[in-house]
Image (cartoon, rainbow, N blue to C red):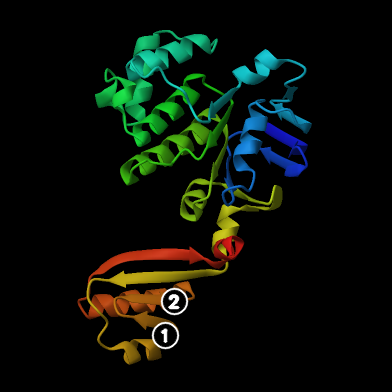
Amino acid sequence: MLEIRGVCKEFGDKIILKDINLTVENGTIVGLLGKNGAGKSTLIKCINQLYRFQGEIKVNGINYRQNSEKYLRNVGVLLEPSYYEYMSAIENLKSYASLSGVSYKNIENEMKALLDIMGLGDSINKNVREFSFGMKQKLGVAMALAKKPDVLVLDEPTIGVDPKGLVAMFDILRDLAKKENTAIIFSSNNLKEVQDMSDRISFLKNGEIIQTVDTEKLLEKENSYVITAQKAIKEKERLERKCNCVVREKQISTENYKDMNVVLNYLINTDNPILNVERENHFLKKFYE
């Protein structure tokens, strides 16, 4: 479990973090959502003890000042990871794992399995200098996982990762939280990624957590649905009379689930294939305004 209490951070006269209080329980994923400059990376660096700060951060009840070795051993971090560019992915991972203080029955096989899980199984012997940015991000997550941490802290882990890799990463983190009981916190400025991956969302604005909410409860309210059809809607007025919706060429917006079903049935009955159905949350949009 990760406990953050009264954390404040200043650089000179500039206040970066103001009285941050947050708990990430075991088996839970918390998304830290905020614009660039909101303080997300600073908070993550404080968790990893890269900055001095006021307040207290505990991992499994342990304060860094009480036992720094045990604190850091229980934290896996993705934060601007560094690699040996002329070493392979498996060599980088084995090197990092050996320094982490964790014991392995067969480090070679376990690191291969970890790279395979991250979608890097075909590139384990390739030099990291040949990796794309997205592949390096995946390797960075693998390095964080190699410590078998109780608390996993990821700073914008999805940057540069392709859509297929995103789905795989989400599945890995969910499994890690539920099966290994890991407490996970990650930062992002991407609305959809945060709501798709998190159990709870903490909204960070101007260095303050203005609200922390359950993702499920947040998505139950203030939603609208956008349906995209393959062909333009010919009977715009007819459809708008059938339900509360707005038709724009191939897209139809509705404000509730019932009207969305009316639209879907209309498209099916008029042989107009449905390309996409997307839910938008107005609270999340207002947060960015």
Element marked by disc 1: loop
Left or right of 256 on screen, residue 45:
right
Which residue is painted at 54% across and 61% down in the image? 219
Q: Nearer the viewer, mark 1 or mark 2?
A: 2
Q: CA distance from mark 1 to mark 2?
A: 8 Å
Q: Position of residue 113 (x, y in %)?
A: 35, 21
Q: Position of residue 245 (x, y in %)?
A: 42, 82
Is 16 drawn above or below residue 74 in the view shown?
below
Which residue is painted at 48% across and 65% down in the image? 280
Left or right of 33 on screen, residue 96:
left
| Quarter of the figure with residue 252 | bottom left
Which residue is painted at 37% across and 79% down in the image? 262
Mark sitting on residue 243:
1
Q: Position of residue 3 (x, y in %)?
A: 71, 34
| Quarter of the figure with residue 227 | bottom left
Binning the other alpha carbons within 10 Å of mark 1 as few (below 14), some (14 to 19) or many (20 upward) gives some
Q: Which residue is mark 2?
A: 254
Q: Position of residue 250 (x, y in %)?
A: 29, 76
Which residue is painted at 42% across and 35% down in the image? 172
Q: Are marks 1 and 2 in contact (CB under 8 Å)?
A: yes
The answer to whether residue 133 is seen in the rendering is yes
Q: Callout 2, which amino acid?
A: Thr
The answer to whether residue 25 is seen in the rendering is no
Q: Callout 1, which amino acid?
A: Cys
Mark sitting on residue 190:
none
- Asked whether 103 or 132 is in front, the reply is 132
- Asked whether 66 or 7 is in front, the reply is 7
Is 34 drawn above or below residue 239 in the view shown?
above
Element marked by disc 2: strand
| Quarter of the figure with residue 29 | top right
Binning the other alpha carbons within 10 Å of mark 2 as few (below 14), some (14 to 19) or many (20 upward) gives many
